[in-house]
Amino acid sequence: MNVQYEQQGNYLIPCIRTKEQEEIHLGVWANRHRRYLKQYHRVRYYNLLTSERLYEYLDGVECQAENLFEQTVKSLAEQEQITEKLKAENMILWVQKM
């Protein structure tokens, strides 16, 4: 590995750069999972962070959690018989049930 150094005063500082990553928006689920990893699974968190795979991993968690949340809401709405027809007929009742 060929590392270049830069002189700053009396010190040689290594010129280390990370590779460019696309900007990923982390939602509420990814941020909660990141906090959970940082608090309870530090080794895994720092391994993902230092290997530059943390945000890719959290993006996957965000997608999975969002899909699960949508499926759960849809399932509960079907169980409670909450439909668009109910929304059109009685908005207050629809809001109460949702």
Image (cartoon, rainbow, N blue to C red):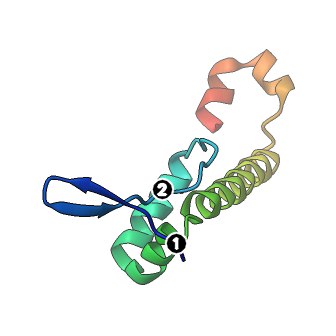
- Residue 13 image position (x, y, % from top left): 28, 61
In depth, the one of 41 and 82 nearer the eye is: 41
Q: In this rendering, is residue 98 above or below 13?
A: above
Disc count in the image?
2
- The location of residue 52, given as percent across then percent down, is 55, 64
Q: Residue 2: give its label.
A: 1
Q: Is residue 4 left or right of residue 71?
A: left
Secondary structure of residue under mark 1 = loop
Residue kind at label 1, given as amino acid type: Asn
Q: Nearer the viewer, residue 75 or 3?
A: 3
Quarter holding the N terminus is: bottom right
The answer to whether the residues at label 1 and label 2 have Cβ atoms under 8 Å apart is no
Looking at the rendered structure, the secondary structure element under dot 2 is loop
**Where, by quadrant of the figure, is residue 12 drawn?**
bottom left
- Residue 16, given in percent of the width and then of the height, sits at 43, 60
Residue tagged by mark 2? 17
